[in-house]
Image: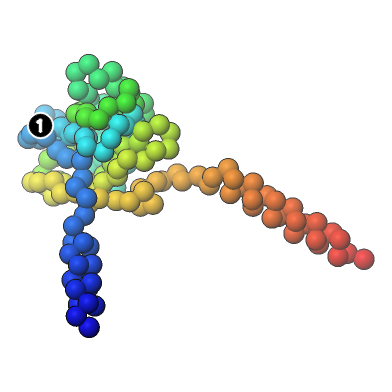
Amino acid sequence: MRRIAVLVTVASLVGCFTPAMAFWYVGDPIEGGSWGQRFEESGVGPFDYVRCDWVSGNMFRVPNVFLNFTSGSNWIPIHHSTQMADATGPARTTLQWDIYFQGSKSDPLSFKFAAYNGEDTWRESVLASWSGSRWSYVSLDQNEWDPGVAPEPSALLLLGAGLGVVGLVCRLRRP
């Protein structure tokens, strides 16, 4: 009985500690017509692609959602819309840049952020929320993030083979 109590206590303590997120804001919000915030990604290993998807509240400001990447980083924005922005560059372990939003900084908003290395090596994803006065973050696992998860080619091959077998069995059963 005592062993069970110790195991439950240890499991509870382990469950309370989540890994530290490596995406956070830097400095004060930037104001002027619209507003922005400097963010930093670091501590997740090398990454060469970042993406933000709007969730609620004020949307991203276009045409320049991402600006002012770390000097000398050679990072460039790829797509910009009011609901999604992404950028890429040489693999880095630390990067800072500004994200700009429509409307007033007193209005709440939230967006999902993700960092990748290569086309499919997921590093981190976070739900970032602005209350109108401060930021909060919730770490997301890869399944909560990926808006366009595509099936593995081997899974598609297996599905095709299975459908082929079903078709063959049906054809052979006909008189």
The residue sitting at 64% across, 46% down in the picture is 157
Residue 109 at least partly seen: no
| Label 1 secondary element | strand
Residue 20 at least partly seen: yes
Quadrant the C terminus occupies: bottom right
Q: Mark 1 points at which residue?
A: 31
Name the colour scheme: rainbow
The residue sitting at 25% across, 30% down in the picture is 93
Residue closest to the eye, 58 or 150: 150
Please state which amino acid type lies under the numbered disc 1.
Glu
Does residue 163 appear left or right of residue 142 in this picture?
Answer: right
Q: Position of residue 51 (x, y in %)?
A: 32, 36
Does residue 113 appear left or right of residue 105 in this picture?
Answer: right
Q: Position of residue 133 (x, y in %)?
A: 8, 46
The residue sitting at 21% across, 35% down in the picture is 42
Quadrant the N terminus occupies: bottom left
Q: Quadrant of residue 70?
A: top left
Does residue 101 appear left or right of residue 166 in this picture?
Answer: left
Q: Where is residue 85 in the image (x, y as percent from the top left)?
A: 32, 33
Q: Position of residue 60 (x, y in %)?
A: 26, 36
Tag count in the figure? 1
* Disc 1 residue crowd, few under 14, some 14–19, many 20+, Cα 10 Å: few
The residue sitting at 24% across, 78% down in the picture is 4
Extreme residue toward the top, this view: 72
Extreme residue toward the bottom, this view: 1
Does residue 80 appear left or right of residue 61 in this picture?
Answer: right
